[in-house]
Each structure stands twice: as structure tokens, then as C-alpha cells.
Image: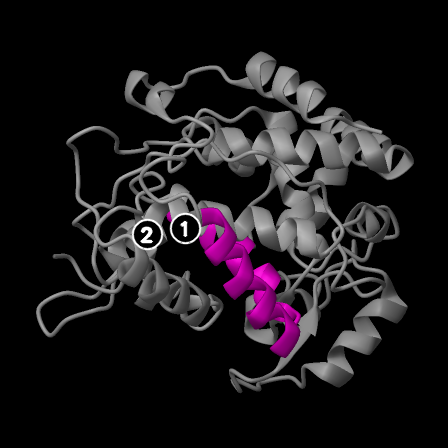
Amino acid sequence: MVTCVSIALLIVLSCVCIHQSEAQLQVGFYATSCATAEVIVKDEVQKGFAKDKGVAAGLVRMHFHDCFVRGCDGSVLIDSTPSNTAEKDSPANNPSLRGFEVIDNAKARLETLCPGKVSCADMVAFAARDSIELTGGLGYDVPAGRRDGRVSLASEASANLPPPSFNVDQLTQSFAKKGLTQEEMVTLSGAHTIGRAHCTSFSNRLYSFNATNSQDPSLDPLYADQLKKQCPQGSTDPTLVVPMDPATPTVTDVGYYRAVLANKGLFTSDQTLLTDTVTASQVNQNTLNPASWKSKFAAAMVKMGQIGALTGSDGEIRINCRKIN
């Protein structure tokens, strides 16, 4: 069994290039100011999960999409206004992100109990951890103390979030810009073991791959036929979705890596992991060592959760996560 101590050691060993302000984050940050903060967030995640198991994947994705744009500052939660299109309404986020109501419900309860104490950014980090644990992943301690940003721009989401069309070199560079290694990129890609994807995000692989192939030759033909039935050619229906891990779409396990090895990676950015000998080896090792991957995933989530964190007197503590104070 992997202990919290061993996870902590992994985190310490893997955390490089961490900004000085991020080092101020600490486990148990709300112990005195709002002792039930994490309990309340977890309760709301459990309620959301009971209604819709897909909420878990949405909250994990939300944390990733928050941290890759301006750092983990809760800016992905801010609503657009007549004068500004916010991150959540970028094509990179809309309509794929969900779970906002879970954060809203938890925030309403916390503002009643501990007004102005718990940041929306920390709540997103807690909710992602709780979602991973609820779906069978490894629980981990979340260093907290993030403060909320005051800027949210749709253009920055498109510029910072790696699209599903990226190849392995582009993915490696995208993650490196955030202080994450190639191995951490492969590890975090395993988050695609839960959740669903809109047909429009991968339909080019089925019908218009390139000048010589209408269908991506790296895609398993039988799987491609199945996807074509679920995603008819030319459809732009935003409600058409398929599971990213066809075998166990609601369980945090190594099913994603098994799918990639079977040429059933849904996105180009999934299947591309087999085009590089190093990343292909990591995919294989993760498949063979589920417990090791879960431990690495927990450590990588903690590290990702510290990207660009605002602490101290920077930013603010939003009263309503959807708008700046």
C-alpha cells in the first residue's frame, strides 16, 4: 500500500521550478480559519457525483484548465460580462467544462460559515482531489493558501491549453512551459481515463485526417467504425459525446493506457504517446504498474496545483466564484 508519507516524498522529489510564492502553500491551511472547508467541498462533490458520475471528470478537467491559464487562481470560474469574454467561454473550455454548480454550492455554504476565508482556487484543487478519490484513484493532501485572480480572458485559454490535435513534441513543450516534465505529461494524460469527449474534438480522425487518409491510420479500424456510429459525419451537435476510456469511463485506473496501447486513444494527443520511444515505454510501464501510476498521478496533481499560485496579499478571496469582488 502506498502511504501518504511515500506520496509526500515523491512530491518533494518531483517539485522543481516552483515559484517562491508557490512554496508558501501548506497542507492544513484552513485548520484555524475554516476547519470544515475541505469537508464541505468533499460533501458537495459527493452530492454532485451521486447525481452524475461525469461530474468527477469535469472537476479534474476544471483544475487542469484553471492551472494552465494564469496559474491555479480560480480564473476559469469567472463568468463573461458584456465587456469581456472569460476563459470558460473559450472554445477550449465551452462546452467541455462542467461541475461549476458543485463549486457554487460549496462556496455558498462556506461563505455562511467562514465568510471571506476560503478561496475559489483552493476549492477547485480540493474538488479535483476528491473527484479522483471518489472514482478509485489515490487520495492525497492538497497544499492550500491560493488566492483568486481578478482576470479571466478567453484568448489566454486558447493560447495556453494544449488542443487534442497536439503531437508528443508539442505536448512536451506545452507542459514544460508550466514546469512539468515529459513523464509528468504522460502521467497526467491518464486523467483521460474518466470522462467523455465531444465528437467535434476528434471527428477529423474519422473523416478528414489528411490529404491521403480520410481516417487516421493509427486508429483501430473496429474502434473507428464504432465511433462513426456514435459521431455521424458532418454533425455539429454539441450533445454528441463518447467516453474517453471505452472500458471503464467512470473509474480512475490504467484503462486509458491500455486503450492507447490498443490504438484506441481517442485524441491525436493520446495516440501520439506511442510515437516516441520514451513516452511509449512510460505508457507500457503505467499499464503494467497500476499502483505506481496512481502514486505518480497524485504527486503530479499536487505539483500541477502549484503552478503560478497567488499567495499572501496577491489577488483576493472571491465572495462569489463567478465574479471578482
The residue sitting at 64% across, 15% down in the picture is 9
The residue sitting at 31% across, 16% down in the picture is 20
Asked whether residue 21 is drawn in magenta, I would say: no
Q: Quadrant of residue 188?
A: top right
For the residue pair 142 and 170, the one nearer the viewer reads as 142
Q: Quadrant of residue 294?
A: top right
Which residue type carries mark 2? Cys
**Percent x, y for residue 60?**
55, 53
Relative height, residue 213 to residue 265 (above, below): below
Verify CB contact (< 8 Å) between mark 2 and mark 1. Answer: yes
Q: Quadrant of residue 182?
A: top right
Using the rendered image of the protein, determine whether residue 162 is visible from the camera's viewpoint.
Answer: no
Relative height, residue 231 to residue 88 (above, below): below
Using the rendered image of the protein, determine whether residue 150 is visible from the camera's viewpoint.
Answer: yes
The residue sitting at 85% across, 46% down in the picture is 261
Q: Which mark is residue 123?
A: 1
Q: Secondary structure at mark 2?
A: helix
Asked whether residue 45 is drawn in magenta, I would say: yes
